[in-house]
Amino acid sequence: MSTTITPIGDATAIQAERMLLGSLLNERDAMPTIADRITERAFVSSFHRAIFLAIQRCWNHGTPADVASVHDELARDPDFQDTDRWLHALYDMTELMRYSVEYGWPCHAPYYASQVIDHARRRALAEAGAEIIRAASAGTDLDPALAMHQAMAGLDAFGAIEEPKGPRTYAEIVPAFQEELVDRLNGALPRRNVPSGFTLLDHRLQGGFYPGELIILAARPGMGKSAMMIQLAHNAAKLGKHTLIYSAEMSAASLVHRAVSDVAGAPFGDLATQQLTPSQFELFQRASEQLARLPVSIDDTSAISTAQMLVRTQAEQRKHDLGLVIFDYISLAGDKVQGDNEQQRTTKIVRNLKHIARVCDVPVIALGQLNRAVETRSGRRPTLSDLRDSGSVEQEADKVLFLYRHDYYVGLGVEQPDDALTGTCDVIIAKHRNGPTGDVRLRFLADTMAFRDLEPSYLQRQVA
């Protein structure tokens, strides 16, 4: 099956391009109004594209973009000189100026730019749709949601059809803050933060996790990252915050086993026995019924890409009031980069996870690993430099949390027992963009792989 693309509105697209270019040539202050809104790829005419780039270069150099200076810029473009349009460029640009004055107003450049972008997006949408049809007809392994996302993402290459935010004065920003103050006074402001469920940790994190934040939770293997992930999901869900877990490491069935153990407060190993006792069966049955009522979704797609995560997170938002997204874990994302450079790949993944947090306006917790170097240091307490590809991860994250259990290293025979640390886990707040760093100590129940607050007396001393 073949598909033929018929150009959409080429005549009107050319007209819009002529109006825009004429406006830019007539009005020297027009370029700043559209410079951050449109790219040269939006032009269907190669001649118009060359003129736009020449005007843009003039503006970048601080040169008035009149016919003479733009013509000089075109003279430096060898690709353009090889075309027949070079012979008539001066006349054609003069005609563009006349056209925009006769049929419009040069001061309306932003409106004409929006029209050019709109036509470019229509053409691109038609091409993307045809490509999707071709792929579907060929029987290739097609992810429809991802294909749609990629088609829509490509539209941004032409520019922003909406008015860009740009700089705003305090006078423009403060009224929204004042409205928020009134809502806070009246108790009408909805609670958007997602508490961790641990008293002292929430105190140190100033309420927990907030929409738009990227939180990195990292530790060496065996510290309890997955157990902490499940507890954070359950704690949020119990407060009515729908939680979405992307599990690239464990299957949904494996996660449910761990989750049932957490809810039941029973050793995870009991679920691995060949035959349950009647009391164990009853305990796990009740726990599974409680689990089924928690607003948690699990996507266990192997090697899921961040582009797929964005599409599926937005789809989940349309179905639920999504409060938290968790990804386990960074290194297992399916994103690829040219040259197979792992550091560049990690940078891309982390930036895209931050993008998901911002676009979807939810906190995103991403699990990560630490370098082996931490094992060779005295004390073995992790620092930011122990993060794999730490530069990009540290830069993009709003909060970085590490888990450290002294008992783990005692079990390995590399640390001496310490009664004060037995049965505990330190959550190390290594980065907190809007608050203090420091350590929070939790109780760790090894048989059930569960975390709990320490005694009230400890909490009172720490809060004080």
Image (tube, rainbow, N blue to C red):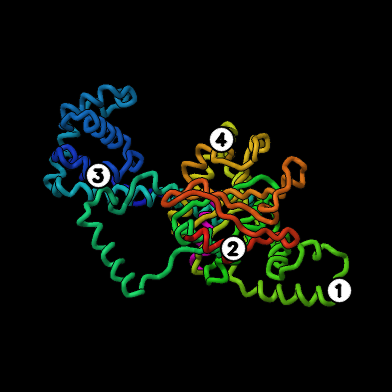
Kind of residue at badge 3: Ile
Asked whether, in this view, residue 200 is left or right of residue 119, the answer is: right
Magenta segment includes 310: yes
Q: Which dot marks residue 69? A: none
Badge 2 vs badge 3, beta-carbon distance below 8 Å: no
- First in residue order: circle 4 vs circle 2: 2
Judging by the rendered image, the residue that carries numbered circle 1 is 277
Question: Which is in the foreground here, disc 2 or disc 3?
Answer: 2
**Nearest the eye: 353 or 140:** 353
Question: Which is in the foreground here, disc 3 or disc 1?
Answer: 1
Q: What element carries label 4?
A: helix
Judging by the rendered image, the residue that carries numbered circle 2 is 233
Kind of residue at badge 1: Thr
CA gap, disc 3 and disc 4: 36 Å
CA gap, disc 2 and disc 1: 29 Å
Residue at 57% from the left image edge and 64% from the top image edge: 457
Q: Residue 370 placed where, x, y %?
A: 62, 41
Badge 1: few (under 14), some or many (20 or more) residues near its Cα, within 10 Å?
few
- Residue 438 higher or lower than 362, as above or below: above
CA gap, disc 3 and disc 1: 72 Å
CA gap, disc 2 and disc 3: 44 Å
